[in-house]
Amino acid sequence: MACTKISPLHLSSSHHIVSVLNMPSLFLVTLLSLFAAPTALAGSSCIAFDTNWDLLAFGYNGKDYNVGTSDQWTSGKPTDITASGRPPFDGTDTKCYLAQFYNAVYVLGADTANPANIYIYDATAKSWTMQTVTAGGFDPTSFEAILDHDTNFFYALSKGDLWSLDMQSLIAAQSSAIAWQDTGAAEIDTTNYDGVMAIAQNHIFFFGVPGVAAGSAPIYVIHFGFWQEGAQSFSSNFPDSHGQATSFFVDSGTNAGVQNEIAFIPDDGSATYVINVDTNTTQTLAGPSTVDANARYFASETALVQIASNGALIWLPYNPTDSGANTAATWSPVTALNSVTNDSPGASAASGGSSSGTSGSSTGKSGASNTAAGGSAATGSKSGSGASPSSTGSSGATRNIVWGSGTVLGLIAAALSLL
């Protein structure tokens, strides 16, 4: 077929003359350069502390960082700890857990090619290995879990059942696989329940459970393997809604390091509730300055850190013996890391889902629900359950993707149409 010659497009003398025939190739070069630019996949990053209370940040544009202790978060410089054997951090619901006795970080949901396997970061040796895990009937794309401090077992709520996984004393992967075990149906209403769990005193506490009054939480007693009859009241009306929960660690020299306080942050960010399970009381502290229903949280002894949907970090100082100081405390950015990753905290995150304030109202992402189908992972609290950011009451945790697949396909189609 004969080609019709297109005359060059002439611009003013102050501009270069550009041929329309060259525009597709220029467009494609530009498009390819966008692919080459470092971007962060939604939900791919996670944070944890090591036993020195150094903040570790994983999955930032192919890099991992040690941000140091909280006194270094304003003006310090993070240490690049990226090492071989690390996970690809290509998941959309990556979660980190600290095994305090072993100074090891267990990373779940960071490898879409091996969704059931767990990566182990030995924080002492600064090395990675991948532990093979047999899922059996457990769905590694739809769950919420805690790591028990004393037994080093994972307990996960998934599709109405409570599952366990023995991590033994692993600081590196062993040759044989470990397997999830089904402990039976959860003795709480899991219908449309987007699970919110935290560990304290070797008990699992569940927040936002349908039919449970505000200020109360059902309990699973790990060491005896039973569900406590009736929910425990904590002398405060923290909302009966979806949110995020994490435990404050305790120095290993104090009560063997067993956690006894939990931070619960509802999706609307209205406050930070710190529940003491020894006294059954609650402190009401400032809500995060970045309101993001898809954020995740991790705590040391004296700091509560939020990782927002865009990867930016903010933190709240915490004093376990001074409630007055806690009441006056405010959230601040972790400038040391944000300046390296170019992430900026905001008043509200663009991908933050809305909270309905009603127990069990999650409709899209239901990692703990016995009625939901597992989907693509979405670090709200569930390891991949596929909720969109607008799902009512769901933590969803879908982060902002710089270039969505639809946008990229549209650009490619536009380029090809010019050929």
Image (tube, rainbow, N blue to C red):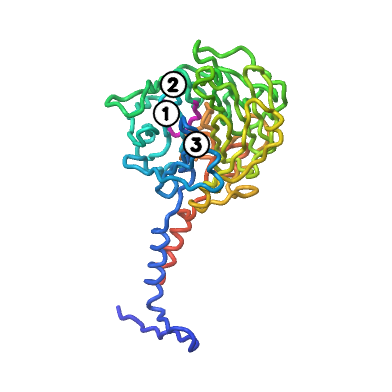
Q: In terms of depth relative to the viewer, which is nearer, 204 or 415?
A: 204
Q: Looking at the image, which residue is at 41% across and 30% down?
A: 104
In this rendering, would 317 be left or right of 336? right
Residue bearing mark 3: 385
Q: In terms of depth relative to the viewer, which is nearer, 108 or 411?
A: 108
Q: In terms of depth relative to the viewer, which is nearer, 162 or 276?
A: 276
Decide: few, some or many residues near mark 3? Use Cα within 10 Å; few <14, some 14-19, many ≥20.
many
Query: Height in image: 35 above or below 67?
Result: below
Q: Looking at the image, which residue is at 27% across and 26% down?
A: 175
Q: Amino acid at mark 3?
A: Ser
Q: Which residues are magenta?
A: 138-146
Marker disc for residue 103: 1
Q: Position of residue 136 (x, y in %)?
A: 37, 25
Q: Secondary structure at mark 3?
A: loop
Q: Secondary structure at mark 2?
A: strand
Query: Height in image: 42 above or below 412?
Result: above
Q: Secondary structure at mark 1?
A: loop
Mark 1 to mark 3: distance in Å?
29 Å
Marker disc for residue 153: 2
Task: Point out the tag, 2 or 1, that comes first from the N-terminus.
Answer: 1
Location of the C terminus (image quadrant): bottom left
Foreground disc of the pair 3, 2:
2
Q: Amino acid at mark 1?
A: Asn
Most distant residue in the bottom direction: 13
Q: Amino acid at mark 2?
A: Phe
Marker disc for residue 91: none
Most distant residue in the left direction: 175
Q: Position of residue 78 (x, y in %)?
A: 46, 46
Location of the N terminus (image quadrant): bottom left
Q: Looking at the image, which residue is at 66% across and 30% down?
A: 273
